[in-house]
Amino acid sequence: MQFGVFSVSDITRDPVAGTTPSEAERIQAAIAIGKKTEEVGLDVFAIGEHHNPPFFSSSPTTVLAAIAVQTKRLVLSTATTLITTNDPVRIAEEYAMLQHVSGGRMDLMFGRGNTAPVYPWFGKDIREGLPLALENYNLLHRLWREDVVDWEGRFRTPLQGFTSTPRPLDDVPPFVWHGSIRTPEIAEQAAYYGDGFFANHIFAPTRHSKRLIDFYRQRYAHYGHGTAEQAIVGLGGQAFIAKRSQDAVRQFRPYFNEAPVYGNGPTLEDFTDATPLTVGSPQEVIDKTLTFRNAFGDYQRQLFLIDHAGLPLGTVLDQLELLGSEVVPVLRREMAAGRPETVPDAPTHAGLVKAKYGDAEPRQPRPHANRGDNVTGASPYQDSDPAFQARFPLVG
């Protein structure tokens, strides 16, 4: 099972210090948090995509690539990548490039995005959000699996003889999660393709996320990808940890009270009772997280939101130390106990390569080659004009 952290990339005023970090400070902080995530022994760092203030992560692949070159083991992911306002051709290119840069240490999570003003900025209509998500992912799925694609749909110009470059590393597409807070259609999409489903699980009660996950498991089995218990499930969660419970509550309360994300609604105590948020000692975080397994069954990925609400970088790094030293080792042991052998591990690039090739050497696509033996169909770069080929010789 994988454990890690994710960031929504908010820029929020620190109510204790009375200051608001700059974009530059938050971007560098995200890179530092990613590096620290690996240092403390966690498995995954994920960052969201936003195109509106008060968020900074408009280009998650850039942030993740910066972390990739400074880490060796960490899986880089997103939380989430917008499948609606992004062109699927551009997604195919950028994330295949990140896959190469990271040596396969990446995957990504798709979501629709629910910020209405963002859609027209990219020439889209939020009222078409669901059909956009379905059509765009259908195209992306093909772009990563077919060397040459002919395609026509509603929301973008047709493609004819198109090759997305670079091709996926080892000719194995990145593993995809589909993330949602409330939408069963996204769970259905994940189940249809046999992809993973990630329940946001940070603001809503467990019973709400359970309905989505139970539905996804049923549909995963319906489409013949395996049993319901073999479906690939990820969960979010929130935590603020201190050695002593009362210190955690005292330290986090001013951030909770002023953070816009909590809406100035329920008290801290009421919110922790009703949602996955845990504010307390390492043992309290362990105990509450273990209730997720009771509710959802065995699952593959647990990510904690600890970088938000104006918390300064030093505090976040301290949180990571406690997660890595006192919380996650216990969770690994407890989650592994009694886990059925039929429940798969979280997908990784190495595992997907092994499943596709066994002990054989992976295919390394060469779409630029002037031969038809290493692409499906004719190379889109071939040209019958001898003058063109003389000026622009193709490299074999």
Image (cartoon, grey):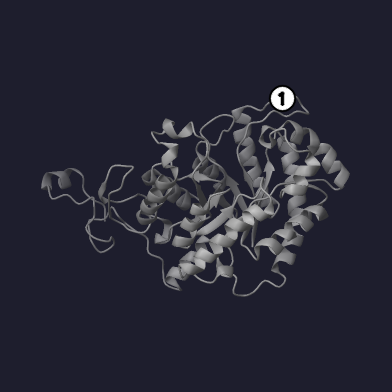
| Quadrant of the image occupied by residue 377 | bottom left
Please tell me how crowded label 1 is: few (under 14), some (14-19), or many (20+) other residues with Cα within 10 Å. Answer: few
The residue tagged 1 is 19
Image position of 315 with respect to 159: above or below: above
Q: Please tell me which residue lies in front, 165 or 248.
A: 248
Left or right of 192? Residue 272 is right
Q: Secondary structure at mark 1?
A: loop
**Along the line of sight, the residue nearer the viewer: 307 or 200:** 200
Asked if one can make out residue 105 in the rendered structure from this viewpoint, the answer is yes
Q: Is residue 184 above or below residue 113?
A: below
Residue at x-position 71% and y-position 65%? 335
x, y percentage for residue 141? 39, 55
Query: Which residue is outermost to the top?
Result: 18
Kindly identify the residue that appears in the image at 39 percent across and 48 percent down: 136
The N terminus sits in image quarter: bottom right
From the viewer's side, name the closer residue of 224 and 355: 224
Q: What is the three-letter code of the residue carrying label 1?
A: Thr
Residue 54 x/y as whole percent? 59, 30
- List x then y, in percent, for residue 140: 39, 51
Looking at the rendered structure, the number of numbered marks drawn on it comes to 1
Q: Is residue 107 left or right of residue 90?
A: right
The residue positioned 46% from the left and 65% from the top of the image is: 353
Residue 362 rendering spot, x and y as whole percentages: 41, 66
Quadrant of the frame with the C terminus: bottom left
Residue 87 picture quarter: top left
Examine the rendered structure and indicate whether residue 86 appears above or below residue 117. below
State whether residue 211 is above or below residue 318: below
Q: Is residue 347 visible?
A: no
